[in-house]
Every structure is written in C-alpha cells, then in structure tokens.
Amino acid sequence: MIKNTLLPVAEFCQRRRDFIAQMPENSIALISAGKEVTRSNDTEYPFCQHKHFYYLTGFNEPDAMLVLINTDKLNAAQSILFSREKDALQEIWHGRRVGQAKAIDDYQVDDCFSLAEIDQQLLPLMSGKSAVLICQPELAEFQQQVLDWLNKVRKAARSGIKAPNSLIDCSDILDEMRLHKSPAELDIMRQVNVISGAAHQRAMQATKTGKFEYQIEAELLHEFAIHGARYPAYGSIVAGGDNANILHYTDNDDTLNDGDLLLIDAGGELAGYAADITRTFPVNGQFSEPQALIYQLVLDSQNLAINAIKPLQTFAQLNHIVCDFLTQGLYDLGVLQGDITELLAKKACKKYFIHGLGHWLGLDVHDVGDYHSNQQREQLRPFAAGMVMTIEPGIYIPLSDHSVDEKWRGIGVRIEDNILVTTNGFENLTINAAKSIADIEQMMSQ
C-alpha cells in the first residue's frame, strides 16, 4: 500500500521561520523556483523543482519565486510567493495552476502575487533593506534578474528610496538546514528505500543471459512507479561485465553475457527525496570463485564502515578503515603486490577503489552539506544524529588491466546502502535489497 508521502505544511512553515531567523537583520531573501527545460523542439523534460525552493515551500510549479523578509521590527517577518496566475486557456493546454488565493491557503505564505506583478510589488519590498540574499549561485539568469531589480531600486534614490548595499550568497544556511533531516523527512526516506530495494530485487529476478541492460532498467522503473516513486532520483546505471568499470555508465544498451557480473546503481525519488542503492550480482545467478572473492571483500569493507558510524565519526576515519582493509585484502588475493607496509601507507587500494566512500543524501542524490574537507581532501565533518549518507565501497578491475591475473579482469563491484546517523549509532535504511552472496543466489534462483 502506498502511504501519504506529503510533508505537512507546518514543516515548510517552520523551515521558513528557521531560515528567516538566520538572515541578517533588515534583509530580504529571493529564492527562485526551477524552470521547465526543453528537451527538443516543443517538448520538455519532466519538471524538477529547484530543491532549495521546494525545501522552503513544497510548491511544485515552475517560474515562481519566494521572498522572505527579516525586518528590524518585532514579529514583522514575511513570506511572499510570486507564481503563475490562473489562466483557463493555459490550464486546458498545460494543466492546472494553483493560483494566488489557493497558494496562500494551501502553502500558508503571508501573501501571493502573480508573476506579472513582480516589479510592482518587489521593488518597494527591497527598498530600505540593508542586504539582498540569494542562495542559488548556479542560476546565472536569476542572478542577472536580481541585479536588474537592484539597479532599478538604486535609480530611485533621488526620491528618497534607500537601496540594499550588499548582495549575499546564503547557500550555506540552507545547505546546513537540509543536512539535518526531520522525522517526517526520514519517514519518506525509509519509504523510498523500501521501494528502491524492491526494485533491485525485481531486477535480480528478471536478469537472464541474453537480455539487454535497458530491459533490466525497465524493470526498475516499473517497480519505482507502481509504488509511487514516479521518477528515478538519477539516471540508472545498469552495467554488465566490463561496463561496471565505467563509474557513471548510463548507456544501458549492451547485452548481458553468461559469466559476467551486473552492477546496478539505481534509486527512486519519492516526494522529492532520493534513494541511492547499488547492488552487484551474477547474470547467470551464480558467482564464480574470483567474483565471489572480490565481492565478499567489498561487502566486508562496507560492513566495517557502516558498523563504525555514530555521532562524531567522520568520513575521513571511515575511509582510513576501508582503505586499510581493502589494501590488505587485495594484497592477500595477489591483486596488489609489493611490501604490505608500503602498500598500506600509500593506500594502494585506490588504484582499484577510485571514488569516495560516500556522500550526503536527501532531496538531491549528492545532497548539499559541508564535508569540512581539508587540503588533503579528507572529509572531517563530524557526523550528527539526523544526517543521512551513502556508504559505497567498490573495486574496479578493467579488462585492459594486464598487471593482474586474467581471472580478475573485467570484474567491477560496488555495494551501496543509505545510512541514517542516530543518537547512539546508525540505522540502515536499505533493508530489503539482498546483498550477501547466499541471499543473492537464492533470490535469483526463484
């Protein structure tokens, strides 16, 4: 049964209050919604709301703008929305619009105006403020629009209007807020993990020698959508054989061959929140001995990292644990050769473990939040309860690597779960996607 996945409007209202409380006194913040993106000619990609805007509003129409005001007057904070106006003809062609009156009722903003009124209403709001805050530096067009509004206010200085004297990037405020998940957010993330785990199960059971990667991708998308996660959180990676050694492989058009592994990195998106799960399994349902040895090494390293997660732990410490373990393991298998002390000192496993151990997860699959990285790229941010991350060690030995025994070549393994930091340790949100060798082989035999 599909649960109600809408966050309560009270949560969005509280987020706006929390954000306003961190704004400089007598300032105004402008946060833009996303825009529809043309795919080709007159067709558009499915609309994806800008996540900062969505985080503060829950409003899912394009072209809107949220205005937040923190004044020096007691209890004078405001939240104002600008959105597309009701238009019967446009709604016949392109779908219903919320409109201004319903936006006030449903999203509990203080006021809502049409986009056509934006200059008339916004410029007086900007007048007399000390600073303008924006939090989407990647939106060049929006930045230019903000500068144009500032110039219009400055041109009115002769009539006694005072223009803001600073433009501030406030991304770090929202990044920090989004890093700490609320109970309601975590409920959605648990649900999308269960949905995504079921999709990985379905993919395992559907995989057969001779099928195409895109046919397995279709099984994933079906399972996502039938349970309410209508879209994938990112382009699904369905990589058979040596394709698994291409980290962001998304062609998904190759044939699945007997004796190869299949690496699937895929997660659904539910109410804006992403899952990010990776499983690797044999196309024919049975691991070969070399595949099983590499797979078990990666799985054991992942379990070591996950079991070490708790408040005040860091990615840097987890990376140290995993790199030592993988280096020793690859040495024991004969994949790495040389003096083990030197191999450990130089993290020799990084020849085959070529990406980071994990990343923050939330409204974006690679979610916002400072990692506190130093010049050595060590991520020193202490974990705290309410943070959600991925843990995804991997070993990649391409067919072209002639420095190793032939039996290892073409093996690519990654295993990825989504982990919540709790007060006393961790909660693995990825609960129903088989990952032990025995469980995978049993599931694929059904």
Image: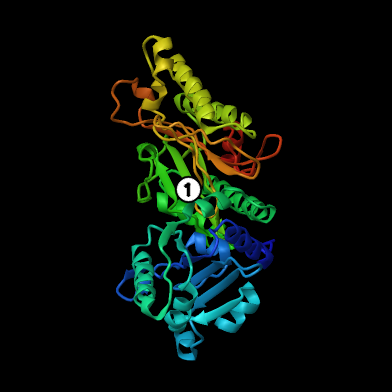
Residue at 43% x, 57% y is 168
Residue 227 visible? The answer is: no
Q: Residues within 10 Å of mark 1 (few under 14, many from 20)?
A: some
Q: Secondary structure at mark 1?
A: loop
As displayed, is residue 268 above or below residue 324?
A: below
**Quarter holding residue 377:** top left
**Residue closest to the eye, 3 or 109:** 109
The residue nearer to you, when weighing 147 against 165, is 165
Residue 11 x, y percent position in the rendering: 66, 62
Q: Which residue is mark 1?
A: 366
Q: Is residue 380 above or below residue 202?
A: above
- Name the residue rendered at 40%, 29% in the picture: 376
Total marks placed: 1
Q: Quadrant of the N terminus?
A: bottom right
Which amino acid, mark 1?
Answer: His
Residue 390 in the image: x percent, y percent? 54, 41
Q: Residue at x 44, y 85 (%)?
A: 93
Q: Depth check: 181 or 259 in front?
A: 181
The x and y percentages for residue 122 are 46, 77
Q: Please say if 145 is above or below 176.
A: below
Observer-nearest of 51 and 285: 51
Which quarter of the figure is the C terminus placed in? top right
Judge from the rendering whether residue 286 lies leftward or rightward of residue 198; answer left or right: left
Measuring from the top left, give residue 174's x and y in whole percent.
53, 54
Res. 236 visible in picture: yes
Colour mapping: rainbow
Q: What residue occupies the far bottom of the structure in this picture?
A: 89
